Image (cartoon, rainbow, N blue to C red):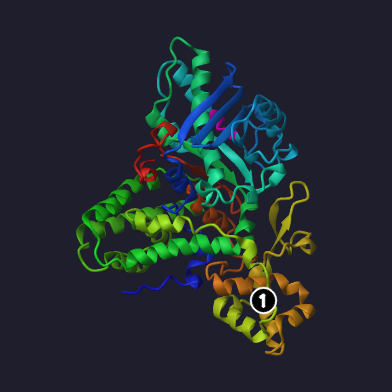
Amino acid sequence: MQVQLRSPNTIMKLSRLGSFHQSKLSFLRSFLDEFKDWEYKRDLFSLDELGYGTAVYSFKKKDRIYSLVCFANKIDDGERSDRVIATKWDAAFTLHDGVPSKKDIERLRNEVPKQEVGRLSYKELTLSRANKSVRVFNHVVESLSNGYQPDLNLLEKVGYLYRTTAVYGSGKFGLADRFRIKNREEINGPFRLEMMLVYLVRQFTFDQVNHVAKSKNPKTAVELDPKICKKLGIGNSTGLGMAPFIVNHPTLLNNWIMSREIALKKIREIKKINSNEIQVFKDSLRKSIKNITSWNSESEYQKKKINSLLEDVQKFLKFIETKFNFEIDYPFNEIYLWIEEKTCNECIEYIASMMLEPFDYIVKPLVNQMSSEEDKYFTIPTDRNVEDLRNIIEKRYPDILKINFTKKENNKNFWFISKNKEEPRYADRFEETGSNLEQPLAIARDIKKLHSQLMVSKNSLTIDKFLAQNNDLRHVVRRAFIIEKFPYSEIQDNTIGKNVIPIDMLRLKLSFFGALKFDPRSDKWLRICMFQGAPLPNELKNFDQQWIYNS
């Protein structure tokens, strides 16, 4: 049986992309799988009794070593902020290529805590900073120092001791450019070094809290129970800075989505599945209910999504346990057709991700196809003609061509870069000034404009001559030729319309990172948790591949 890939006109709508969940393809899970047989070590741990100082952690395999260098700093409570404009943090980190010398550590001690204002070198690969969840951190210190474990209810509500506010890489602030390291096999998956940094930071938070508790009361202190450590991840605050990324990297976006869609298609085409595969799917599904019921949010928008998800997943569980026969031909195709008809978008994508769990042999080869050499596809084929381009647009952007951009509601917002932090921002063009500084992120509007211009141009006109007359449309001409080959490269929605929810764009990217428990704080920023439930470094040699459903 042949199953069609799901249509981009369905999947690439923001309401659907904003319902995506982590899966076996997610970067933090593929990172752990890749590095499970590397040697982990804590090389340096020089903190004072209050937990301030320097630590170094490493992963080593043969001659390759990656080292996380950590600097824990004293800051006043009033200086602690999750906003990108902050200038001080509880801790700052960089991932160093190789073993840092004493000279390197001294250099980094002067630069890393400054973050964007500092200057790194080609020896450093990623850069980050994080703040304590002060209430949770202090509670854990107090409990451990007095000889008992912390309140699990409090820890479950928050889910972490620290949260990061940015993780930088690829040449920013003097860091190594990607071309230096892109051919290393172990980091072939997207954002693998960023995932390594976050994972090692998580271990640092456990070591630091244990150290502070022991220093406070050496005679009675106990260490944080490893089972509790596993239930904690690293928090993250993410704002609009992440949203343009998926617009500006079309082939990369396509490869992420395409890998997931190919996996789903292949699983739906399996005629017979064995009892072990059935069990892994069912076990993952049952255990994952805890992830949903412990998903806390103050956002009414998110609460509705969580409630709908829980209701539909429970309905689906009842269906497969009481009515469904896995011995039929193509059982996962039948399951997919059922959820598509009977459940909400949130549940459809949740179960779609869950369907990947039993099938390593399908998923693993796809992990290596999720990167992209984007510059290969940057050149516009100027020998093609207007008719070619118009046909591509009419085939690939059918719903976008229906949008009327003369209506105020469809042209309501604009994207711009803030002067202070050079970060993307979003504003109402009819209420705020600055639309003359609009960034070229309104792809739907510009595609519509391009199509209108093509309609009054001669079919045989070559693209070089068309661009000579319409240079302002070059960016979308390039995108149209990209989408011809990469069908999932474009959001099939209006990103400047009245009804757009910007956090849907953030959630799409974060789901591929492997984030859990999205907690919107507005329609423009949210908090998440990463590596919650993950094995600790000393457990990596042998761990449950479905660990994410134990969190």
Name the kind of residue labelled 1 in the image. Answer: Pro
- Residue found at the far front of this picture: 63
Picture layout, residue 4 above or below residue 272: below
Which quadrant of the structure image shows residue 359? bottom left
Is residue 180 positioned above or below 100 on the image?
A: below
Give the magenta part as a residue range: 131-136
Say which residue appears at 66% left-offset and 24% top-offset. 102
Number of labelled discs? 1
Q: Which quarter of the rendering shows the C terminus?
A: top left
- Nearer to us in this view, 465 or 181: 181
Name the residue: 51% across, 52% down: 189
Task: Point out the residue furthest to the top here.
Answer: 219
Secondary structure at badge 1 equals: loop
From the top left corner, tell me how far across and down residue 146 is, in percent. 44, 15
Q: Quadrant of residue 449?
A: bottom right
Is 135 covered by the magenta stretch? yes
Image location (x, y in percent) of residue 119: 74, 38
User: x, y (%) of residue 149?
Assistant: 40, 23
Is residue 102 part of the magenta span, yes or no? no
Q: Is residue 339 visible in this depiction of the protein? A: no
Residue 96, picture quadrant = top right
Residue at 49%, 16% in the rendered image: 214
Find disc 1 in the rendering and name its residue.
381
Position of the N terminus by quadrant: bottom left
Residue 23 locus on image (x, y percent) = 42, 53
Residue 481 seen in the current view: yes
Does 218 sit above or below residue 263?
above
Q: Is residue 47 above or below residue 240?
A: above
Q: Residue at x 58, y 26 (%)?
A: 55
Badge 1 local density, few (<14 within 10 Å), some, or many (20+)? some
| Nearer-the-camera pick, 392 or 145 | 392
> Going by the image, does 160 lie left or right of 272?
right
